[in-house]
Amino acid sequence: MRALQYLTVGAAPELVDISTPIPGPGEVLLRVTAAGVCHSDQFIMDLPADQYIYGLPLTLGHEGAGTVESWGAGVTGLQVGDAMLVYGPWGCGRCYTCSQGKENYCEVAAERGIQPPGLGAPGAMAEFLLIDDPRHLVPLGGLDPVASVSLTDAGLTPYHAIKQSLPKLVPGSTAVVIGVGGLGHVGVEILRALTAATIVAIDSAESKLELALEVGADYAMLPGDDAEAQIRSLTAGKGAAVVFDFVGAPVTTGFASRVVGVGGEIAIVGVGVGTVDVGFFSTPWDSAARAPYWGSRSELMEVVELARAGKIHVEVEEFPLSNAPDAYQRLRAGTLRGRAVIVPDPMHAAGDPT
Ligand code: NAD
Ligand code: ZN
């Protein structure tokens, strides 16, 4: 089968032919229908060799959708052709947090070497994808796979971040969203769907500000001193109840620290190595910062229901697998609108799993 693999540290990913996996006991083989392109892929491909921990070659793609093709011994309850989304942050399934469905915070995944598809295990940018356990599949529920594959990360990650902050996002409050790319634009929609908060979107690219307004932000502005002043003025000096930072660079976490209000929260979602210096003399009283990671299995089901209800949707640009390297170039150039989604080339996707 064809797959997009990261082969050499520092080099662009390449299309390769590899053998199609065969599901072992307890495993499921999906015929991939769509795979999303995430900035985290770029982040890991930019890591120097001594910090790169995801193995080589790595088939990319931690947002996946597909139809059930076959399964190994012991798997029950599936039918060939069932349309599924892949829950990506695989855990052990048995520890205390996993038993609550929060496999994103599995207590033993790191020590046991359990890694998500596309971030250690072979990912979804291929014609077929091996799933380690059927519990990591969530039915698509009639949604279109290309339009919906990114619910698994660009939807789930902001949902998880926002859900924890809902008690603060009361009517009259203000939420600031920094970075209106793949995750951020869905974040704006989720805030719109779940809260009555005023939504202020910040992005360094003008085109993303237009997107932010289209998907439900009340205000959209470039970062900087002027934006800080505008947020102060919009909130009558109070500052933001919650700042969701989908960039997470020092410049944006610094901005977040300056616009958050008393009792407010900063959720650092982007992996740009920025930090928030919480302290009595550095941030407003009783403010807090956290760095959420991905989301739980039940939260993915909730995100799918939000999409099925028509309350959120992902803006996607579709690329055939043969053009997947272009999608990564567009991501790097910052010219994507929403999420890039890779689909297997029709000629190949029609083939047998050999
Ligand atoms: P993206 O490239 O689609 O979007 C990033 C957006 O941020 C773009 O619109 C860009 O114009 C904007 N931006 C960049 N620098 C900026 C700045 N200094 N000020 C304002 N705006 C700026 O990326 P994405 O796929 O949405 O991912 C966003 C971040 O979230 C990445 O760091 C990614 O690695 C991370 N991520 C984290 C998790 C998690 O679980 N915490 C999950 C997925 C992705
Ligand atoms: Zn991601």
Image: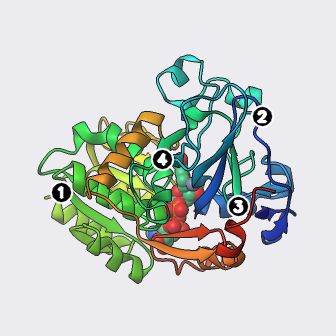
Nearer-N-terminus badge (1/2): 2
Residue for badge 3: 127
Amino acid type at circle 3 is Glu
Residue wearing tag 4: 276
The local secondary structure at tag 4 comes to loop
Position of residue 216 measured from the top left corner of the image (x, y, whole percent): 24, 67
Q: Which of 162 and 323 is in front in this view?
A: 323
Q: What element carries label 2?
A: loop
Q: Distance between the residues labelled 4 and 2?
A: 45 Å
* Horizontal relation, residue 56 to residue 200: left or right: right
Residue type of the residue flagged with mark 1: Gly
Q: x, y (%) of residue 125?
A: 68, 61
Residue indicated by mark 1: 237
Q: Position of residue 346 (x, y in %)?
A: 64, 74
Task: Tell whether circle 2 marks a residue whose Cβ is less than 8 angstroms from ligand 2.
Answer: no
Q: Choose mark 1 or mark 2, whichever is in front.
A: 2
Q: Say which element carries label 3.
A: loop
